[in-house]
Amino acid sequence: MATQAEEAKVSERLPLSPEQQALLESGTLTDRAIQARPRPYYAAMRAGDPIHHDKGLNSWLVTRHEDIWAVQSDPITFSVNKGYHEIQARGMHDEFRNYLREHGGGYFPDAIMSDPPYHTRIRKLMENAFTAHRVKELEPRITQVVHDLIASVADRGSCDAVTDISIPITIRIIVEQLGLDPGIEDKISRWSRAVVAQISAMQSRDEMLANAAEIADLQNYIIGKMKERESDPREDMISDLVHAKVTNEDGTVERLTFEEAVSLVRATLIAGNDTTATAIGNLFYVLTTKPGMAELLESIVDDDRKLNRFVEEHMRNEPPVRALSRMCVKQTVVNGTTIPEGAHMLLVYDSGNDDETVFPEPRKFDIERPNLGRHVGFGGGPHRCIGLALARMEIKVAAREIVKQLKNVKLAIPESEITYVPTVATHTIESLPITYDKR
Ligand code: HEM
């Protein structure tokens, strides 16, 4: 039960217009039109019902910045383990798990999507593969990959910014970092979508089975690679994860089990892939649709401090990850709303980043916002994105190379024809045809 202090703390609700009222009554994030253009729905929730029960999803949407922080900072009451594993293959859990046991080398629960104290141990072990030092060292190589990819389409004058540039960049980089085989890129794109689809709450049974077949294929592939690295370690992330160990204060040494390591290689491959590709796709979107953005990027591209702030404001303004799950393990009052025990919740990051009480004029792109680093595009608390340094580096290098190699970048279709991948988890453009001149 909530304490008196918790029940007493209720921030202001604002009056809603009749349209907003109707939107809250009939709207749902499962509606593809709302998924594609969700801001009016978020604004109505933030104003009048900030932790709103979405009937279509049967999930509580946490939409204000302060409430997202409160929930993500309390991993005991709001469980990632239950939130993630229960939503996976919604309603078809057993069939999904059995399929992977039969065809995919096993069902490996995602070890990082867990709760403390187990999560704390896994996270420490996983951080071995993501040191800041390692990421900084990657800059020249990432620049080379991004440079070559953009150069390969620069002469054409037109391409699809999502499928020809953004997705190949992030896949190529993660393939190299993990130490996978060149040529595996096409499969990785399909595998990523299949994993993300399990938490999207949008699958039919046939789609779930088709996606499970992709995940089985992915697991069989990474298990093969991990076995190779067990006996023959190299300078790559798979080797780091397979051999990860930490020495505790009492001198005991902890290692990952093979099952845990499989789940972490899979998580690294997927988590950093669609998300970063979405961020770069969104960058092309804003450069081609928002007046002044291309000029702004051009004017700051050689100023490292400003470019870092540009990337961060982009993460606030167009966050690739829309919403991730929690489950409330006991009835709890959050900012005046009673969340029942066992209720499913979504932290709606792209609404939190638009919270006008924290970010005045939230739709304005302003790299001089004093509190720009408070955005929740990478989450926060104990589950904060582990790959954020790598993601920031990839987006920054992409921004730099776009300006250096291309000019007059324009959208080749009307903005209203842009379509989004059907999922509540990310806000991902499916295809973005553009035209440009080579610089
Ligand atoms: C722009 C790109 C990215 C975005 C927007 C993003 C966003 C996020 C968010 C919002 C979370 C919090 C999850 C939660 O609290 O439930 C998260 C966690 C995570 N991210 Fe990222 N991410 C990005 C790139 C990456 C990359 C490049 C990697 C690795 C290669 C990565 C690996 C992870 C992992 C393993 C977690 C789970 C951490 C934990 O639970 O302790 N992400 N990410």
Image (cartoon, helix red, strand yellow):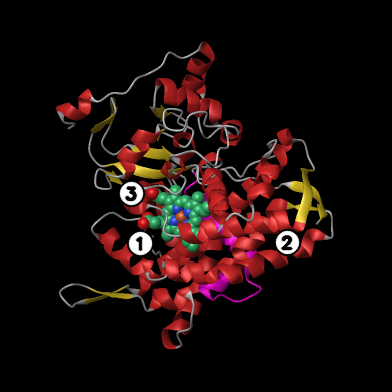
Q: Which residue is mark 2?
A: 150
Horizontal side of 73 relative to 190 (left or right) equals: left
Q: CA distance from mark 1 to mark 3?
A: 17 Å
Q: Say which of marks 1 and 3 sits in front.
A: 3
Q: Secondary structure at mark 3?
A: helix
Q: Which residue is mark 3?
A: 381
Q: Position of residue 112 (x, y in %)?
A: 36, 59
Decide: few, some or many residues near mark 3? Use Cα within 10 Å; few <14, some 14-19, many ≥20. some
Q: CA distance from mark 2 to mark 1?
A: 36 Å
Residues rendered magenta in the picture: 175-200
Q: Which residue is mark 1?
A: 111
Q: Say which of marks 2 and 1 sits in front.
A: 2
Q: Note whether 134 is above or below 420 in the view shown.
A: below
Horizontal side of 304 relative to 387 (left or right) equals: right
Please name the amino acid that badge 3 sits on: Gly
Q: CA distance from mark 2 to mark 3?
A: 36 Å
Does the beta carbon of the residue at mark 2 sit less than 8 Å from ligand 1? Answer: no
Q: Is residue 195 magenta?
A: yes
Identify the residue at horizontal 60%, vertical 71% (top origin). 141
Q: Position of residue 75 (x, y in %)?
A: 28, 47
Please name the amino acid that badge 1 sits on: Ala
